[in-house]
Amino acid sequence: MEDPVLSHSDPATGLPTGPRPTPAEGAASPEAHSSQAVLDLVLKSVDDDKAEDIVEIDLRGRSDVADYMVICSGRSSRQVAAISEKLADRLKQEMRISVRMEGKETGDWVLIDAGDVIVHVFRPEVRDFYQLEKMWLPMGAAAGAARTAKA
């Protein structure tokens, strides 16, 4: 059975079912991790796997779906799938989080739902087409939001 804090979407549709439960409501288990800890592992994982143009977006107070969104690119469909698969494996091994993943078969755009952290891994052309950063970042912030691989 999935932890209700880490999975807050309808299994049939994948859509959010409402506000996420908080630890104060008794939903968290001793195995639950803070969203910051999950974010830190996500950022380290995608950086270790040579993802490019990594952007972290703080959604706290702006969305009931997640606390953070990470957007990054792989150079090819194969790399996009590999980044996504390794991230899912690391989250499962290090934090015992089972993620939901969509799009790995095609490798153009993989969406990884790690509960409080949503990760989008794109091929560069697909990322340019959808421009998710423009939807979620404040005006003018998209240009300077990419994290450098060594920062």
Image: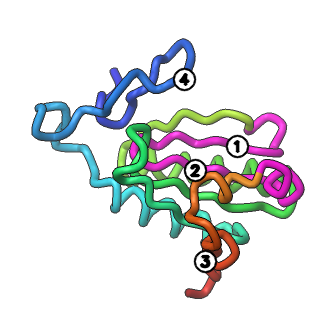
Using a 10 Å C-alpha cutoff, classify the residue at mark 3 as few (fewer than 14 neighbours), some (14 to 19) or many (20 or more).
some
Q: Earlier in the sequence, mark 4 or mark 1?
A: 4
Q: Residue furthest front?
A: 139
Disc number lying in front (1 or 3)? 3
Q: Position of residue 33 (x, y in %)?
A: 28, 51
Query: Which residue is painted at 79% across and 34% down in the image?
Result: 105
Badge 2 element: strand
Say which residue label 4 marks: 14
Query: Which residue is painted at 52% across and 47% down in the image?
Result: 118
C-alpha separation, residue under disc 1 versus residue under disc 3: 20 Å
Tell me which amino acid carries mark 4. Gly
Say which residue label 3 marks: 147
Q: Earlier in the sequence, mark 1 or mark 2?
A: 1
* Quadrant for the C terminus in the image: bottom right
C-alpha separation, residue under disc 1 versus residue under disc 2: 8 Å
Tell me which amino acid carries mark 2. Val
Q: Position of residue 79 (x, y in %)?
A: 79, 57
The residues colored magenta run: 104-130
Foreground: 91 or 54? 54
Say which residue label 2 marks: 119
Query: Which residue is painted at 61% across and 64% down in the image?
Result: 46
Say which residue label 1 marks: 110
Query: Which residue is painted at 39% across and 46% down in the image?
Result: 116
Q: Earlier in the sequence, mark 4 or mark 3?
A: 4
Q: Earlier in the sequence, mark 3 or mark 2?
A: 2
